[in-house]
Structures are given as structure tokens and as C-alpha cells.
Image (cartoon, rainbow, N blue to C red):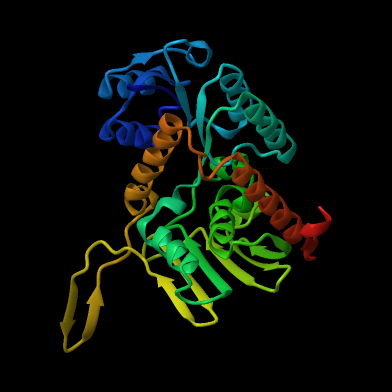
Amino acid sequence: MTLKIGLLGCGRIGQVHARSIKALEGARVVAVADALPEAARALAQSCAAEVRDVDAILAATDIDAVVIGTPTDSHFDQIMAAAKAGKAIFCEKPVDMSVANIRACRDVVMRAGVPFLTGFNRRFDPNFASMRARIRDGAIGAVELVTITSRDPAPPPVSYIERSGGLFRDMMIHDFDMARFLVGEDFVRLHAVGSALVDPAIGAAGDVDTAAVILTTASGKICQISNSRRAAYGYDQRIEVHGAQGMLRAENQLESTVELATDQGFRRDPAQHFFLERYEAAYLAEMRAFLQAVTTGSAADPGIEDGLQAQILADAASLSRETGQPVDLAKG
């Protein structure tokens, strides 16, 4: 049986998902939709699919699942319609900017009994997945301290910043999910700070481009997250997990593993430029996991609850940064 997929959104992330589906057996893209007709036509041609509008795809009887890569403000309506139509759902993060809306989506998805995977692709990175497996196997004993570093090579346009929901909801939300993924406990307290050090226009738009967050669990485990919209050396993605019996560390992926040694010292290549290169394998593994969940009836992971919990943390970080005070998550 071939799983028939409707792809909503033909921009950069839609193209990534289309390539992943094309590379995997047991599924194909039947139809695509995008607000830009030319983008839809180009992607449809590349994967031998039809161009349809969003409503037609959501209502179609010849489509089993939808991949949602449209702007965030369209996710709510598309999730609701897809769930009510009985379609499996893959939705890019964030599920929605509103916690209340995500809860409403969750309730409809659960009642419909359809698979739902939230697009936190970093869980599927081979390095981070190996780190999680080793933690579970007890390689470093009980986790005590997690340090997550995530820095983009350059900031996006201010026009994007203005509709992104802010750094915590747009960028750090991946790290909030990774923190939950690695620590394995719920966080009860969060303290965030942030500044606009990269581009004053980002600050003028009401956002920050440099931020740090401290999260703690009820048992006292600590996670530190730092984000920046600027890294002159490339896409910076590092994680360190310190435990009672040792440490695990995942380093940056470089353009090559070649190292030059001369009388001037040692020189290595820069980190891979951005997320498309760095997480290429993760995107493929993520789509494979979605297809497996749909075809076998197993639980999709990360699910919509993971999307909800990451959004709650992002909202709390935004509030903490604005007020200058820690947020007690146990009190809502």
C-alpha cells in the first residue's frame, strides 16, 4: 500500500519534506498547495503531483495524510479540517502561537484518533538521538545539567521577525523541545533574559536576537539554553549533558573533517552554514518516522502534546524576559 500525501506549503520547508517523501518507499505526494501558484507548480512538477487548493486537499478522499508547512497562522484551521476528515497530520512547529488553540487542536486530534507528528526535527538528528539513547541506557548516570547552544549564522529580515512570534517561539522552541527530550522530566521554573545586540531593528520590532534561559525540574535538574541570531563561523548547534557518572557531548557538524596543521597552528573548516545542510539526515528520519506511525498504527513521536509543552515554555520565556522575573510553571 502506498500512502498518499497532500503537501500544504511549497516553500523552503515544503521542498525539504517533498524530497524526503520522494526518497522513501511506501509514500508519494499526490497533491500540493501554496499561496504562490508558481511555487506550487514547480514543486508539483518535481514530484509528479497535482496542484490543488488547500481546501480541496483537506477534503480529498484520495489523500491519506497531510504535511503542513504553511505559515503558522494557518495551522489551526488546517489541523482542525484534516483531523475531522480523518487524515494523518504532520505539522511543522510551532503548532500554533496560541496555547489555547493548540489545546483545542489536541482535543480534536485525540477524538478523531488520527496520527499527529509535530515537526521537531532535531530529535531525529543521529547525534542527538544517540545522546538520548545513551542517557536512557545509563551511560552517564542520572542527568544533572544540560547545556544547549543554538546560534544562527545571521538574523532573518525584520519583516520575518515581526510575524515570527519572537525568538523564544520561533527559534528557541526547538531547544525547549530538546531540553524536554533529554532531561526526561517536566520543568517547574524558568528564567529568561534577552537583548538586541545583533540588529537594533530587531529590538525596535519588540524582539531580541540574543537570549539565555535557565530551566529547573522539581528534582533540581538544570538546563541552560543560549541562542543568538548571529554566528560568524556558521550554524552553531552543540549540546552537552552532564551526569552523575560522566558527560555526553555533541559537537558542530563541519563542512569537512579535514584539519590543516602548519607552523601557524591547526585549522579546521567552519560549521555547516544553516539548518538545511545540518539537519538533512534528521528531516529524512523524521519523515520516515511519520510514515511508519501512519502505516503501522504506532504512536507518532513527538506528538501534539510535545508541541503544546514547548509552546508553554516559549510563552513563559517571553513573559520572564518582559518582566525580568522567573516564571513558576507549576502554577500555570
Question: Which of 204/85 is in front?
Answer: 85
Question: Which of 185/67 is in front?
Answer: 185
Figure label count: 0
In the displayed structure, 20 sits above or below 235; it is above
- The image position of residue 126, as x and y in percent, is 36, 57
- The image position of residue 240, as x and y in percent, is 48, 72
Q: Which residue is most to the right?
A: 331
- The image position of residue 208, as x and y in percent, is 62, 57
In the drawing, does residue 42 fall left or right of residue 249?
A: left
Residue displayed at 72% across by 60% down: 321
The quadrant in which the N terminus is found is: top left
In the drawing, does residue 177 fall left or right of residue 8?
A: right
- The image position of residue 38, as x and y in percent, is 36, 19
In the drawing, does residue 215 fall left or right of residue 33?
A: right
In the displayed structure, 173 sits above or below 191; it is above
Question: Which of 320/28 is in front?
Answer: 28
Residue 108 location, quadrant: top right
In the displayed structure, 39 sits above or below 286; it is above
Residue displayed at 59% across by 29% down: 75
Residue displayed at 71% across by 31% down: 104
Residue 327 location, quadrant: bottom right
Residue displayed at 59% across by 23% down: 83
Question: Which of 41/108 is in front?
Answer: 108
